[in-house]
Image (tube, rainbow, N blue to C red):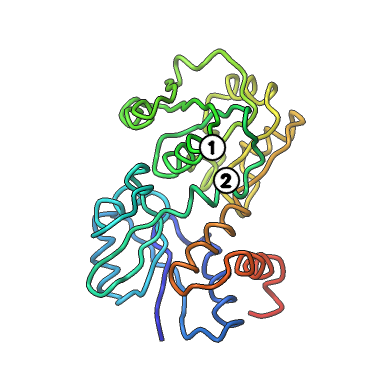
Amino acid sequence: MKLLAVLGDPIAHSLSPLMHNYVYQKNAIEAIYTRIKIADGKRLREVFEANDLYGANITIPHKEEAFRLADEVSQTVEKIGAVNTWVKNGDRIIGHNTDAEGFMSAAAIKSGETALVLGAGGAARAVAIALLERGIDFAVLNRTADRLAFFERYGAKVFLWENPPNERFDLIINTTSAGLKDDSLPLEINALENYLKNAKGAFDLIYGKKTPFLRLAETLGVKAQDGENMLVFQGAIAHSLFFGGDRTQIAQDMKTALRFPALWR
């Protein structure tokens, strides 16, 4: 029996076990997927190896540490500098990032449109590379300057809270944890309202709850989307890395698990 897990902090809200275990059950895969809370990202590999994990997904706030601790990563992951999936290969850990492809599969944004990325962590890096590879112009707005050099290296416009960009964007994307455990917003409310009023849509990577960011967007009449579809698509990609299989079918099965959990749990 193979053991897999999602690693991070906070972790109790994660729906990844629900999705993955349903796919295992449906396809007679001898595996169990669980949650493991890790406060200190430097312990990721220690915990992974101590539990003899076959694979893992890494979430907030350890994606950049997971990149540093992996033995090998792909060229795309080298660009992103953050890892959200570990696959065991003998004694080596191979790092992948399924966030970028998962985001683009879920987000309603087209070539020629623009985006404002709120936050500059590991998830923001994946979103930025996904937008960059599809030729979508975007800017990054963060509270502090310490992580902005990554985005500047790829030609993105970067801004701090005290000096936000004076322009409109088609899609406002929250990649921060604001609203996950509290009622905070990812940006000062007046500036955020101004961006949302001029946007076509709002996307929050957080899933499973209507965050203050999404509630504000809906109040202003802006189409709002949470991160559930991104969770499903990136989860399907991760499963295919662990066990193979058709990603489209896996995504459909994972959506079923989320929609009708009482039917199989």
Residue at x 26% of width, y 72% of height: 49
Determine the CA span between mark 1 and mark 2: 9 Å
Q: Which structural element holds mark 1?
A: loop
Quarter in which the C terminus is drawn: bottom right
In the image, 28: left or right of 170? left
Query: Mark 2 packing: few (<14 Cα in 10 Å), some, or many (20+)?
Result: some
Q: Amino acid at mark 2?
A: Met
The image quarter in which residue 216 lies: top right
Task: Report which residue position mark 2 lands on.
Answer: 104
Compared with 191, 181 (above or below) is below
The mark found on residue 53 in the picture is none
Quarter in which the N terminus is drawn: bottom left
Which mark lies nearer to you, 1 or 2?
1
Percent position of residue 123, x then y: 44, 44
Q: Which structural element holds mark 2?
A: helix
In the image, 227: left or right of 39? right
Compared with 240, 220 (above or below) is above
Compared with 155, 29 (above or below) is below
Task: Report which residue position mark 1 lands on.
Answer: 134
Residue at x 54% of width, y 37% of height: 134
The image quarter in which residue 5 lies: bottom left
The image quarter in which residue 208 lies: bottom right
Residue at x 38% of width, y 57% of height: 96
Q: Amino acid at mark 1?
A: Arg
Which one is in front, 257 or 107? 107
Percent position of residue 53, x then y: 34, 74
